[in-house]
Amino acid sequence: MDKNTPILTADYLTTEYDYIYTNLAQLKHETKTLDKVIMIVLGLTAICCGVFTLIFVGGGFLKNVCWVLLIVIGLFLVSFHDVINPSMTRTKAKKVFNANKDKFVSRNVMFYEDSVEILSDRYKGNIPYKYLYYVLEDKNVIVLYLDKNDYISVPKRLFSEKDEKSLERLRELIGQKYIRIT
Amino acid sequence: MADIYNRHIMTIDNNKIPILMYGKAYMLSHMRRGRLKGKEWKATVFFVVWLMCMFYMSVNRFHMSANPVPLGISIICLYMMTYYLFILPKRVMLEGEHIYKSSHMLCRSEKITVTRDGYTLQNKYETLCGYWTDMTDCIETSEYFLLLGEYSKRLIIVSKKSIDDEKTECLRDFFKKTMTVKYRKVKK
């Protein structure tokens, strides 16, 4: 392939869903498995203790309320990383997007053999892959991190099945910095 | 017509930002619109609560065993004061330095073109444009000018080391005139 021909091109305007998916992908990446496991173990322990004492120990009305509360806390802990935190992130992202709608401008991203070209009305960059901080991919978005704080998100809805080969090539070119999350 | 808007004011070549300057600027930006906003006020609230606890304990002649709750609250308040005034700013500054280290663009020398309506920042790999109307803050310190924009997370820093005194004066006057309400000078 010619070096000046892009492997993949994306011309898009970030929508509310794109922004939400980006936030969810970042959240997924930031959540450590150990944290998740600890929360689930603590939650299950709380639920088991609550159910056991409620059935076999019981007590007065006030005590029963405490055991039910313990079960509720357990449920909260178990579902925190998979249900509660994502839905909170979704709500927050929705709010942020609607408050800053005019700041999400159209963007043109072109992936070449050795660099990525990003064009918008206020930014023009041709960043070699080696200078990217890392790249995050989940089933909805590809997030290019220019540094720890600054990123550009490319929605995968733009790509069809035909582009899968090009995406695979891109993963090869970026190498270790390319992180796929499932 | 476009020439009027793009009327050239100044070009700053070789604007290079050292890591420490970026860390300080990042901290300053968080004091304007981030986690450090109103840290003095928050610390003052804890200081007032601490004073009240001390007063209560002094009425009870500082018997520690008789005042476990005010003692506990005063310790928490002391920690929170230290947290807001010293720990959090240091942490934010380190975060800024971490961002600087993670970027291959921030450490490069930049060319900044200042025009009547905006700026253009260029380095080897990227070009950023912005308008003064997009700016939320323009802060001058003894070492640099810091511009905070609405559209970009990127901090625009003009190091005073890269411009002479005459240009610094000219830039200060220009910012004062263009962003009257947004301009402020700080001692840090």
Image: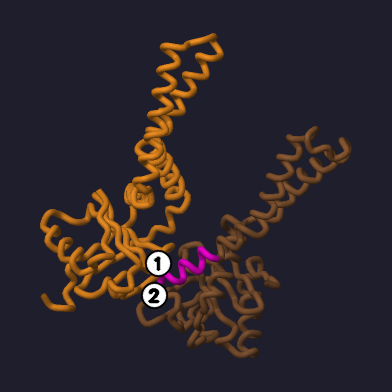
Q: Position of residue B17 (x, y in %)?
A: 51, 79
Quarter of the C terminus of chain B within the rendering: bottom right
What residue is disc 1 on? A147
Q: Nearer the viewer, residue B9 or B21?
A: B21
Quadrant of the image occupied by residue A156: bottom left
Task: State yes or no: residue B98 in magenta.
Answer: yes
Label 1 to label 2: alpha-carbon separation: 8 Å
Q: Position of residue B154 (x, y in %)?
A: 47, 68
Labelled disc at residue B104? 2
Residue A130's place in the image compared with B93, above or below, is below
Residues in magenta, as a range: B94-104
Specify few, some or many for label 2: CA neighbours under 10 Å numbering under 14, 14-19, or 20 or more: some
- In the image: residue B118, left or right of residue B53: left
Residue A166's place in the image compared with A64, above or below, is below
Task: Identify the residue at image location x=47%, y=50%.
Answer: A99
Q: Chain of mark 2?
A: B
Number of labelled discs? 2
Q: What amino acid is found at the position of numbered circle 1 in the picture? A: Asp
Q: Position of residue B148 (x, y in %)?
A: 54, 67
Question: Main SS type for the magenta part?
Answer: helix
Q: Chain of mark 1?
A: A
Quadrant of the image occupied by residue A161: bottom left
Residue B87's place in the image compared with B138, above or below, is above
Query: In the structure shown, which secondary structural element does the residue marked by tag 1 occupy?
Result: loop
Q: Colour of chain B?
A: brown
Task: State yes or no: residue B31 in magenta.
Answer: no
State if disc 2 and disc 1 touch (CB < 8 Å): yes
Task: Identify the residue at image location x=61%, y=90%.
Answer: B164
Task: Identify the residue at image location x=38%, y=33%.
Answer: A78
Q: Position of residue B147 (x, y in %)?
A: 56, 71
Chain letter for orange?
A: A
